[in-house]
Amino acid sequence: MSNKILPADFCNRISAQIPEDAADLLAVLDTPPPVSIRINPQKLQDYAAGIPMLWHQEGYYLFERPSFTIDPLFHAGAYYVQEASSMVIVNFLETEKYEKILDLCAAPGGKSTLLATAMQQDTVLISNEVIRARAGVLSENMTKWGSPNVIVTNNDPRHFGALQSYFDLIVIDAPCSGEGMFRKDLDSRNEWSLENVAICAARQMRIVADVIPALAAGGHIIYSTCTFSAAENEELIQQVLQAFPEMELSPVVLDERWGLVSSEINGVSNSAYRCYPHKLKGEGFFVCRLQKKGVKPAKEEIFISSKNARNQQNSSKKDAKKTPFPEKEMKRFLREYAVENIEMYEDNLFYLTPQVKETLKDLARFHFIKKGILIGKIQGKDFNPAHEWALCPEVATDLPIIDLDLPQALDYLRKNDLPNDTELINGWALARYEGVNLGWIKVTPQRLKNHFPVNWRIKHL
Ligand code: SAM
């Protein structure tokens, strides 16, 4: 049975760490956590049933926790359910500086969906997760979100060392001892121990050290955890600065009214921040920004390990098959300007922007879970659009639409066919709920055939 009491060693350490605040913090950990979401501005303009968040204009608190499963907008990627404090990282971004972003520990996708929305249109996000099953969940969430300039990989942090001076921003939302989740996830209290804090700190150091070579000069690392222990936060950053003299603190000044507590590292103010749940409406969180000294070299000078470069040439010859495809049929599914970004691999058509294509070549040896957006598949003479294309904002706007009400939308998400009471008699149409695309329907005179992915269907309502 789950022991819901806060670990005694944790309480003792907090009492020594923040003596004036310890009682308030420990008390608030036994109260219900706030519920918050972040909207996808490509799909929703606002969230009328929520209270706007102070530090992220797309963040909202909800009055209570609804059943997200029975909200079609949740399945359509119109919003992401995300803990409030972690959204503060949006204020650490200098998006105009970033051509390539790596989100190193990305599953299930909270930071990656935030980055995909905040980054500039021609920036590429590599969203990586080392644990295979979690990389699948990440890919699903990125698919729902629909941003085209995203690549999902399933690699160990040390693999990124081959990409020297490649990324302009690396987000490391490190696996940690999870003290900040003690009220949201009661089981995390049982998994905690002083030994585990030390194990996490050692692992965090390895993870950061693995990717520092991949950061371009002048580039940022945003390091975050959801724990209160200094060993995994300020002390970890101090160790990094000692071991890597090419790295320096990159302070950010936040609005004091938001309630974050500024940490001083090596005497530098605003070099890091802590979110405490007794001081703001969110869970425990730590965030710090570092910068690599120097200036990013001109493009030609960026060095990718020779082994990688060789493989990259072979693989681009092997993979990209420029065979003709049923162009006319295909084009109906894309906005006019999107047509030039079609790439065909065997019978699959992908939407790959020039930046994504270039990045895929650079990362030829990586394990891809998702590359740009799959538009669809050619099967014989037919072209079948892919689910992820329905959820991408580049999908054509003049395709037939079938607007579903709530019971119909839930039936659609259960993967049931619907009776055809529309004027349409055949062809592909987009199922839509409250103006947001849910997926594809193949129309026949009697039925609306459901093409929602079988693995994603709602099994229990
Ligand atoms: N950034 C995610 C988000 O916002 O949704 C949450 C990331 S969670 C705090 C940390 C992630 O690191 C987990 O997905 C975990 O599987 C992954 N992880 C675990 N061990 C790791 C390791 N040795 N190297 C890199 N990532 C690891």
Image (tube, grey):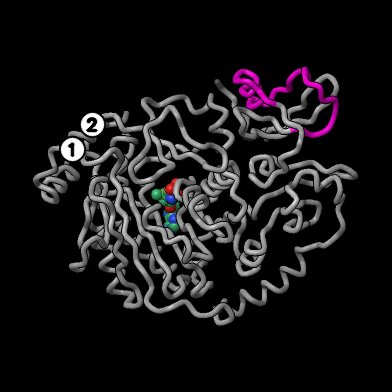
Whether residue 361 sits left or right of residue 449 in the image: it is left
Residue 350, percent across and down?
A: 72, 53
Query: Which quadrant, please, contains the N terminus?
Result: top left
Is residue 101 shown above or below 71? below
Element type at mark 1: helix
Residue 212, percent across and down?
A: 42, 70
Task: Residue under label 1, please give it.
Answer: 26
Q: Residue at x 53, y 26 (%)?
A: 71
Residue 425 in magenta? Answer: yes
Along the line of sight, which residue is nearer the eye, 197 or 325?
325
Q: Are marks 2 and 1 in contact (CB under 8 Å)?
A: yes
| Ligand 1 lies under 8 Å from the Cβ of mark 1 | no
Residue 9, percent across and down?
A: 17, 45
Q: How many marks?
A: 2
Name the outermost residue toward the right.
381
Mark-to-mark CA distance, 2 and 1:
7 Å
Whether residue 448 sits left or right of residue 453 in the image: it is right
Is residue 250 shown above or below 143? below
Along the line of sight, which residue is nearer the eye, 52 or 19?
52
Residue 392 in magenta? Answer: no
Name the outermost residue toward the left.
20
Q: Amino acid at mark 1?
A: Leu
Q: Residue at x 73, y 68 (%)?
A: 316
Is residue 436 shown above or below 412? below
Q: Which mark is residue 30?
A: 2
- Residue 140 visible from this viewpoint: yes
Looking at the rendering, which quadrant does residue 268 occupy?
bottom left
- Range of residues picked out in magenta: 403-429
- Residue 130 visible from this viewpoint: no
Residue 74, percent across and down?
A: 53, 33
